[in-house]
Image: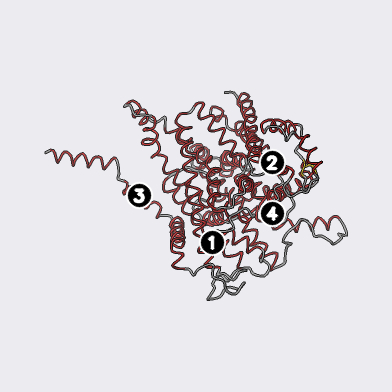
Amino acid sequence: MDNSLNTELEAETKVYKPSRATRLFTIWRKLKRSRLAVSGLGIVIFLSLIAVLAPIIAPDPNLMGVARLPPSVEHPFGTDSRGRNMLSLVIYGARVSLYVGFGSVALELLIGLGFGMIAGYFGGIIDEILMRITDVIMTLPELLLLILAVSIFEVKSIHYIILIMGVIGWPFVARVVRSEFLTLRERTYVEAAHSMGASSWRIIIHHILPNTLSTIVVIATMEIPWYIFYEASLTFLGFGDPSTASWGVLLELGADYIRAQWWMVTFPGLALFFTSLGFNLFGDGLRDALDVKQSVR
Amino acid sequence: MTLRNYVIRRILVVIPVFLLISMVIFFMVHAAPGDPTRILVGERSRVPPEVMEDFVKRLGLDQPVPVQYVLWLGRLLQGDLGYSFQNEKPVITIIGERVQLTLELMILAEIVSVIVAVVLGVIAAVKHYSIIDGLTSVVALIGYSLPNFWLGLMLILVFGVQLRLFPVGGTQTLGIPFPTPLHALGDHLRHLVLPISVLVLVWTAYLFRMVRTSMLDVLGQDYITTARAKGLRERVVIYKHALRNALLPVITYEGYSIGYLFAGAAVIEYIFTWSGLGQFIVEMTVLRDYPSVIAISVIIAIMVLLANLAADIAYAFADPRIRYD
């Protein structure tokens, strides 16, 4: 008797609250409908695999042979000015770029979420102050602020570059999260949680935050290529970490040989383009599947 | 809030934000490792000690940093942007020499990309799910995913190095006399083609995505159905009813993205050795000529703040709802 009641109850709960797996499946079904989104996801997975498996699939990129060889069967992307295998370099570059992309976005989310949640939920003077801070940081274009910070503090390490990108990039996330919180905090379920005596933090973390996840995931996906671009641009302009073989470093080196050795600037850039295309395709598809109303940056 | 109050409030907000930005820029430079005086004079410039001493006294560089900030801000408000020892010129003079090239590049690219993006964006949205929509959207996504500096390099490689159609850098062919100013202009325009193409391709891709999304959004609203039900011609519905509203977010976006446009143009100027402000700020950062860097950063900040202000006010005029925010 008791048991049957329980199962009945469970059955009912299942109707109202689909399990996480079911929700993921629904998202996947929607995503699958778009061929472009699936190919985007494919690219992202492919890149991740390449980055992880680099030591297994590619020969050591630091091996030096004959310099400036054009693409051939042995060196499909040719060799660079120091005789290194460009294909190996590009494959190893994926590690740097993905590290930069994921690292900066993780940091940006951490700071942006914190500020956005507090500003949007508490409002008032706290909101006003936090939003003025985002105004200040957002006024100067990210790339210029990055160049300034990196050059002034004489940063030459990829880890510091990521740190600075996160510290400079969060206002955008904070803005979006804030506006989501502004709307969501007026919902009746928040009121209900309040009346049941839930603390502010409990409401923020357990009731509102989960409802902003779709937006956050979409933003994160679409921000990743930006940071990869920023690192590459920064490096190309001469403010990067010369000790890593990032695609930006390869492009900077290759640009000097543009007149005679076309492959040295072509392949690292193609990799950059391909990566960004993958994340953008996937992000677009995800946005439609999750039904997020978010304009491009 | 009335429109007037909103505008006044919005203008007043600019002042504290500007002060904060100027502080950030100023203190960031002063937090740099090394002797700040040396940094301000330029680490690589060879300035005689007595000139240095005079400079330090005159600018109050021997004072505590907050006092220095106030002095600097005072000079800034009087239009004194500082002196670049490495260029041996006041920064304002250098800006005057270079601003025209940057504006030329940015304004031309902006005009072309706005026209192309709006036209294609409207067509794609009106013919949603058609082949044209699919094709333009994919092309835009490709343009959106292209790193601008790499696109620049590729254009140099193909059109400059291989096909030899256009010059790969600079703003004018040096060392040859031009028979008429018209020839000189033609030569200048040929230098303009590649950098402009990069900016137009990338910016159009962005704007197109905005216009299309915004237009689709508007076309799905009830008042469009009403307009059609009234029997208005499709052209009137699209251009008079839909496009006007669809362009609102695009205008705001434009106002807000001016800083990004400048940064994008700076990278392109650097690649094409286009001697505008963008190339200048990159070079001066490399050379650590901080008077120039500070001055240009402040100018960019002012430019962005004014553009944001203009966008917000324009939006408030066009859409009364936002005043109650």
Relative to the observer, which residue lies in front, A102 or B169?
A102
Do tag 1 and tag 2 residues touch (Cβ < 8 Å)? Answer: no
* Quarter of the view holding residue A63: bottom right
Chain name for mark 4: B
Q: Secondary structure at mark 3?
A: helix
User: How far is the residue under mark 2 from the one under mark 4?
Assistant: 27 Å
Lower position in the chain sequence, tag 2 or tag 4: 2
User: How far is the residue under mark 1 from the one under mark 4?
Assistant: 22 Å
Q: Is residue B5 depicted above or below A86 in this figure?
A: above
Chain name for mark 1: A
Which of the numbered marks, if any, corresponds to residue B36? Answer: 2
Q: Circle 4 is placed at which residue position?
A: B270
Q: Which quadrant does the N terminus of chain A fall into?
A: top left
Labels in figure, total:
4
User: How far is the residue under mark 3 from the one under mark 2?
Assistant: 55 Å
Tell me if mark 4 has few (under 14), some (14-19) or many (20+) residues whose alpha carbon lies within 10 angstroms of its own.
Answer: many
**Same chain letter for marks 2 and 4:** yes
Which of the numbered marks, if any, corresponds to residue A24? Answer: 3
* Amino acid type indicated by mark 1: Ala
User: How far is the residue under mark 1 from the one under mark 2?
Assistant: 41 Å
